[in-house]
Image (cartoon, rainbow, N blue to C red):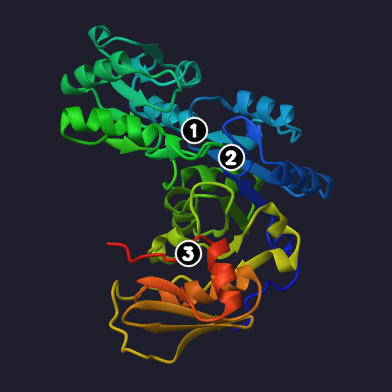
Amino acid sequence: MNVRTPGRLVDRHDLVIFDLDGVVYLVDQPISSAVAAICRLQGENVRLAYATNNASRGSAEVADLLARIGAPARPEQVLTSGAAAASVLAERLPSGAPVLVVGSPALGAEVRAAGLEPVSRAEQAPAAVVQGYGPRVGWVELAEACVAVRAGAPWVATNLDPSLPSEHGPLPGNGALVAAVQTALGRGPDLVVGKPQPALFTAAAHRVGASRPLVVGDRLDTDVEGAVRAGMDSLLVLTGVNGVTDLLHAPPSRRPNYVAADLGGLFEVDAVVAVPARQSVPARQSVPARQSVAAEAGGWQVAADEGGLRLTGSGTTLDAISALCAAAWSGCQVGEVRAESADADQVLRELGLTGHGQRG
């Protein structure tokens, strides 16, 4: 199976839409390879956009942050879930209506810019509640949201990301804070605006008239699923939240077109691999014991039996990922991923798959 892309990946698309956390930076610390890649894209006049579920900063703040880390951007290139949520509320509420804001000052600013009045207490009779990530959100804000929603205010969440990537590992994201309110109320938000809803991606493409966008992200449940819903190609980079274990178990709605270690995959043919096309398969297809090769890619072979997948042969790490995905996504039971050659053992250790057990 030929899993290499013909020519540079970036040359086959007329817009690159980047996620931010886990792709360009971790919290506020730049991913050096990402900054270099963005600068290279800018030097080649490739059209860029940024779509983030993190509502703690406005578009101008994000553009300033990108400039500080060495990847200058214009505010109009940045689409945030906070701005999208404020826009939705402005369409549904009369001008000047009070909206209880649970999140950062930037989210409140987006609400005000949309012609609504941000408030902080349920006793102010808000016409709606909007909740987005804010590093200083605490019990008081969550309690006010509970009271307002229980009194009948519609509840809009900017996103449901359970975690944010950081140099110390995943940290609680807006989804974790929404879950606290949901637990208290016994129900979820009335509307979720950000990824995996496709609106941020389709808006980015519409702004520049792009017809072949590429979405680059680190999360399968937001970036990749959002791209699938928008009918766009996607590249998963392994610098943030999701890794190969998650990829093998991804349902069809969360399967990217390409995988790369980092943004170097946009330019180098050997730094990116195409993974099998999205397809609907049975969740747990029965595989006879001692079945012959289920997938091949670049010198690797993957066989499947009742215990899981067996990798043998040799080749690049990316080709091993493609072969494993081909087997897993064809309906084979993933179970335990085992090595049957010295090279396979080394690659599985690199991918964190040694001793990988069955999920669910």
Q: As displayed, is residue 187 above or below residue 100?
A: below
Quadrant of the snapshot with the N terminus: bottom right
Number of on-image labels: 3
Q: Are marks 2 and 3 in contact (CB under 8 Å)?
A: no
How far separated are the C-alphas under marks 2 and 1?
9 Å
Residue topped by disc 3: 353
Residue topped by disc 1: 54
Q: Amino acid at mark 3?
A: Leu
Query: In this view, which residue lies farthest toward the right?
Result: 43
Quadrant of the snapshot with the C terminus: bottom left
Q: Is residue 331 visible?
A: no
How far separated are the C-alphas under marks 2 and 3?
27 Å
Residue 28 is situated, as x and y percent measured from the top left of the image, at 61, 29
Q: As displayed, is residue 277 above or below residue 253?
A: below
Q: Nearer the viewer, residue 67 or 167?
A: 167
Residue 198 is situated, as x and y percent measured from the top left of the image, at 46, 48
| Quarter assignment of residue 68 | top right
Of badges 2 and 3, the one in the foreground is 3
Q: Which residue: 22% across, 18% down?
A: 148
Q: Would you call the spot at circle 3 few (<14 residues within 10 Å), some (14-19), or many (20 or more)?
A: some
Q: Are marks 2 and 1 in contact (CB under 8 Å)?
A: yes
Q: Is residue 129 visible?
A: yes
Residue 105 is situated, as x and y percent measured from the top left of the image, at 48, 16
In this rendering, would 287 be left or right of 319?
left
Residue topped by disc 2: 20
Closer to the N terminus: mark 2 or mark 3? Answer: 2
